[in-house]
Image (cartoon, rainbow, N blue to C red):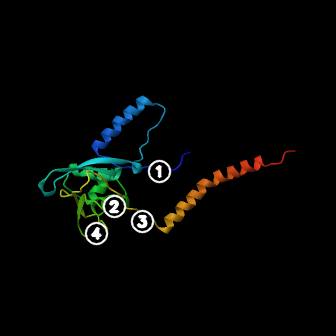
Amino acid sequence: GFWPTYTPDDLNLPLEMMTCIENFGAFHVKRSQHKILRWVHQLGSATVIGKFSPNGKQKEHDLIVSTLQATVLLLFNTQETLTFDEMQKALNVPAEELKRSVLSLCVGKYKIMTKKGEGGPKDILPADELSYNPNFTDRARRIKVPMIAARITQQEKDATRQSVDEDRKHAIEAAIVRIMKTRKPRE
């Protein structure tokens, strides 16, 4: 067994990322044939070079983002504007997870994307239109774009605690048995 466990995702990666994964996979097979390579996109990060033109001047920023944020930004290489629903279908990601990523790009500290629609300033509806912000600028060349924290309900906290206790139960019982065997009086 191994810990922690990660739920596999079915993220549809853009062609640019798939090419990199395939190249690294081929390299990995040559180096170590007995190990299996498994991608956990939730833990990844990427550096995306964003080209902006504030006040008509060309400016580049190195955006350090999560893998999901990078896939969202790369969608705008082929299209100027996307609705949230189109974005979700293109990436094959649960709506709540995608909302966090999109909100961090258009509502957070760095407004790399713009949002138009009836959704409030902190919410996104399926029909809301999203586009990249060509006027974005910042003094720093390298920018680490933070993710918005997920809202965790009390039920989710309780369920997590219960599953952790269940996972630890066997290890605790085994440790108790080992201790009892070492303290067993010799005859």
Q: Position of residue 59 (x, y in %)?
A: 18, 51
Q: Return the disc, 1 or 3, that comes first in the chain's sequence.
A: 1
Q: Amino acid at mark 3?
A: Arg
Compared across the picture, whether 65 is left or right of 82 comes to right
Check contact, mark 4 vs mark 1: CB within 8 A.
Answer: no
Compared across the picture, whether 121 is left or right of 8 comes to left
Mark 3 = which residue?
151
At 51% across and 64% down in the image, what residue appears? Answer: 157
At 32% across and 60% down in the image, what residue appears? Answer: 104
List the single residue furthest toward the front.
139
Mark 2 = which residue?
99
Q: Nearer the viewer, mark 4 or mark 1?
A: 4
CA gap between label 2 and label 3 equals 12 Å
Name the foreground residue: 109 vs 29: 109
CA gap between label 4 and label 1 equals 31 Å
Mark 4 = which residue?
121
Name the foreground residue: 23 vs 88: 23
Q: Position of residue 86 (x, y in %)?
A: 26, 57
Q: Secondary structure at mark 2?
A: helix
Q: Amino acid at mark 2?
A: Lys
Q: Return the disc, 4 or 2, that comes first in the chain's sequence.
A: 2
Q: Amino acid at mark 4?
A: Pro
**How busy is the neighbourhood of tag 2: few (under 14 within 10 Å), some, or many (20 plus)?**
many
Mark 1 = which residue?
6
Where 87 sits versus 124, above or below?
above
